[in-house]
């Protein structure tokens, strides 16, 4: 197999001492931010983006991927022990995991989460290894019109998946697209929405938006309600070892979770939320003891955790083969590619084999490191949960300040950061999802570029998007994804009306 | 859901509409070279502005039909706790004003202390000390590692 030859080469890249060190730093840092409530992988990678000026691309991406995977592992520890899911993807883990912890079975809950994450993360990485070269072959025939249609589909699915309302998701996305438009248009030199401000001509830095929404906004939101919620860390009781029965009940859930999570992560639909919920319901349905669900059923931790990590791996497939980010973290990684002047897309596998295969190999290594870090050392991570809230959140704001002021030394940028933070607070209050903003601002300029390229080739003929079979298919799917829920709900209410009439 | 809460949701929809209208208006003010008249730099801005206006109508509909469930409309969620928020916002604002004059380290210490106060820290001198040390370490560790230029300031110039 061609892919496995390339993968072997990737291991020679990833196993050099220096890259191994970056991987270790990444997974350690990732676990820490995953454990700490209020910090996430997207925010951490955004704060570390300046590192792209210092180290070579392969090392930086090994670091970023380590943070991404590490945060997935660390997040489950927090949701099991204090029932405040750091990310939406771990909500389901908290359902059963926290119940297990309350019943003195915190140890096995952490173990099945960590081992399940390892199994699914590894299976997911195998999935990337096999699937990526295949998708690249298909993607090489994509024209600009097809790419535009693909991005349109990603916009629609991302907005409807990452939140509770498609309308609010799309509004967030449109704000992101608007932020992405600010600055000089590269094709014509036309300044857009810069209000004559020098600082805005280069566009708004993704670091400012990401840190503003995720760090400042989140801190304000917590400040508005921390006195009214009580959090309690449950100490880990009992042994970390799983009993034979725990193993028997877990391993099938891990595998099922992985097979649900990976494809859903790899689709341009994005988000780990749906696969985790799906896995939970599958486990509940298949369980021989469904009455235990809600009272600490181990399958309810094993399956969703596996689905979560497999879908995290799946996100790399569209990112590395099509340059299509389907989560906020992936969008920040795309920004890192930009910073290196690398254009992600199907050519990436041939032009940057060291980078891509080194990165994939580092995912295998990272999974092993994470299992070691998270199982025997879990007590250590629980310690960092004991950082007092005032010090933790004040510290997050200091780092947010460094991350933006340090790049530009501009008070204007700092003001923008805090302003976006206040916007982020209102978005939380009114339930607008924040990830589509990041995806919109990063992917928007690419979509515009492909749109204009397609129209230049067709000499301004708009029908180009509807005459190419692939682009037409993607646009139809996007339209269906957008309209189906509306059609279903209006037909339902219409049927109700005719019934009562 | 009370009427004031519905009204608040309506205001959010209105804000989205106003932003959309502003985007469309600003786009009409752009001078576009005729060579790019067909697929120029205004196509996307018009689209985004238009989409925002359309979405604001849907948001309005959700607000009126009380089909918009969020913290701000949930009767079980208490209103935002203003005192801690005030401390945090005050810290951010002071940092914004001071950072250019007294430098990152001192102004971050001020912000750190105020945010910690907002989150209920009792010993403020300890918070100030921790904030100062964190800013110092961050300045010399994080900033140097990433080669960020944090600028000068009272403390920065001493070392």
Image (cartoon, grey):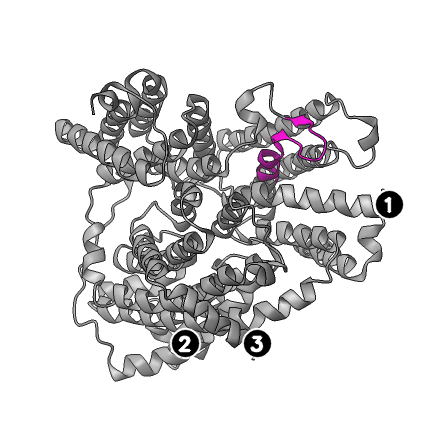
Image quadrant in which the C terminus of chain B is located: top left
- Contact, CB < 8 Å: mark 1 with mark 3? no
Residue density around tag 3, few if under 14, some if 14–19, many if 20 or more, within 10 Å: few
Chain letter of mark 3 equals A
Whether residue A15 is visible: yes
Disc 2 crowd rating (10 Å Cα; few below 14, some 14-19, many 20+) is: many
Q: Name the residue under label 2.
A: A253
Q: Position of residue A172 (x, y in %)?
A: 56, 40
Label ID, residue A445: none
Q: Do the residues labelled 3 and 2 touch (CB within 8 Å)?
A: no
Question: Residue B7's x, y, as percent?
Answer: 54, 29
Residue furthest to the top in view is B101
Residue B101: x percent and y percent?
32, 15
Query: Does the stretch in magenta take in A177?
Result: yes
Instruction: Label 2: state its secondary structure.
Output: helix
Q: Where residue A108 appears, x then y in whole percent?
A: 25, 71
Q: Which residue is drawn at 40% across and 50% down?
A: A41
Could you say which is closer to the camera, residue B148 or residue B130? B148
Q: Which of marks 3 and 2 is in front?
A: 3
For label 1, the SS is: loop
Residue extent of the magenta highlight: A174-192
The residue nearer to you, when weighing A404 against A328, is: A404
Q: Circle 1 is placed at which residue position?
A: A461
As for residue A397 lying within the magenta part, the answer is: no
Q: Distance between the residues labelled 3 and 2?
A: 31 Å
Q: Are marks 1 and 3 on the same chain?
A: yes
Residue that label 3 marks: A2
Q: Does residue B91 appear to the left or right of A123 in the view shown?
A: left
Q: Nearer the viewer, mark 1 or mark 2?
A: 1
């Amino acid at each position: 197999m061609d892919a496995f030859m390339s993968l072997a080469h990737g291991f020679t890249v990833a196993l050099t001492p220096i890259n191994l060190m970056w991987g270790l730093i990444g997974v350690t840092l990732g676990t820490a931010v995953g454990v700490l409530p209020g910090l996430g992988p997207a925010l951490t990678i955004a704060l570390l983006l300046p590192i792209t000026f210092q180290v070579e691309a392969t090392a930086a991406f090994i670091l970023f991927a380590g943070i991404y995977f590490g945060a997935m592992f660390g997040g489950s520890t927090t949701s099991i022990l204090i029932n405040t899911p750091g990310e939406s993807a771990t909500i389901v883990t908290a359902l059963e995991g926290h119940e297990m912890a309350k019943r003195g079975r915190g140890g096995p809950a952490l173990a099945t989460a960590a081992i399940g994450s390892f199994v699914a993360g590894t299976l997911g990485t195998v999935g990337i290894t096999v699937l990526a070269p295949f998708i690249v072959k298909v993607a090489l025939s994509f024209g600009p019109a097809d790419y535009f249609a693909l991005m349109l589909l990603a916009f629609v699915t991302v907005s409807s998946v990452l939140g509770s309302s498609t309308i609010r998701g799309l509004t967030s996305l449109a704000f992101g697209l608007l932020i992405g438009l600010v600055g000089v248009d590269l094709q014509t030199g036309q300044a857009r929405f810069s209000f004559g401000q020098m600082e805005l001509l280069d566009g708004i830095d993704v670091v400012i938006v990401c840190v503003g929404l995720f760090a400042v906004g989140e801190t304000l939101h917590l400040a508005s309600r921390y006195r009214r919620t009580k959090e309690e860390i449950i100490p880990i009781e009992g042994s970390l070892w799983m009993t034979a029965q725990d193993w028997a009940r877990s391993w099938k859930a891990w595998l099922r979770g992985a097979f649900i999570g990976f494809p859903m992560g790899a689709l341009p639909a994005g988000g780990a939320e749906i696969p985790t919920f799906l896995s939970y319901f599958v486990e509940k349905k298949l369980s021989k003891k469904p009455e235990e669900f809600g009272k600490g059923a181990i399958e309810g931790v094993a399956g969703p955790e596996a689905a979560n990590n497999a879908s995290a791996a799946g996100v790399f497939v569209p990112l590395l083969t099509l340059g299509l980010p389907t989560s906020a973290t992936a969008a920040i990684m795309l920004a890192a590619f930009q910073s290196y002047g690398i254009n992600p897309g199907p050519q990436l596998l041939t032009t940057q084999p060291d980078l891509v295969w080194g990165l994939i190999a580092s995912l295998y290594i990272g999974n092993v490191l994470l299992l070691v870090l998270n199982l025997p050392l879990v007590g250590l991570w629980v310690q960092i949960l004991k950082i007092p809230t005032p010090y933790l959140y004040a510290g997050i704001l200091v780092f947010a300040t460094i991350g933006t002021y340090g790049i530009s030394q501009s008070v204007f940028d700092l003001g923008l950061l805090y302003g976006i933070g206040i916007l982020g607070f209102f978005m939380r209050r009114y339930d607008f999802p924040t990830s589509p903003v990041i995806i919109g601002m990063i992917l928007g300029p690419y979509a515009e570029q492909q749109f204009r390229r397609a129209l230049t080739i067709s000499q301004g003929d708009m029908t180009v998007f509807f005459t190419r079979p692939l682009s037409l298919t993607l646009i139809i799917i996007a339209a269906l994804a957008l309209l189906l829920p509306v059609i279903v709900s209006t037909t339902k209410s219409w049927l109700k009306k005719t019934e009562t009439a | 859901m009370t009427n004031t809460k519905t009204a608040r949701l309506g205001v959010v929809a209105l804000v989205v509409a106003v932003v959309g209208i502003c985007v469309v208006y600003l786009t009409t003010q752009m001078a576009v070279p005729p060579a790019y008249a067909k697929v120029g730099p205004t196509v996307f801005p018009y689209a985004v502005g238009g989409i925002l206006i359309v979405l604001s109508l849907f948001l309005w509909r959700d607000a009126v039909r009380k089909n918009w469930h969020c913290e701000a409309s949930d009767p079980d969620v208490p209103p935002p706790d203003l005192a801690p928020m005030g401390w945090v916002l005050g810290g951010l604002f002071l940092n914004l004003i001071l950072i250019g004059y007294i430098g990152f380290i001192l102004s971050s210490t001020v912000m750190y202390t105020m945010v910690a106060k907002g989150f209920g820290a009792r010993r403020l001198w300890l918070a100030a000390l921790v904030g100062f040390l964190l800013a110092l370490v961050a300045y010399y560790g994080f900033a140097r590692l990433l080669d960020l230029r944090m600028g000068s300031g009272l403390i920065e110039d001493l070392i």
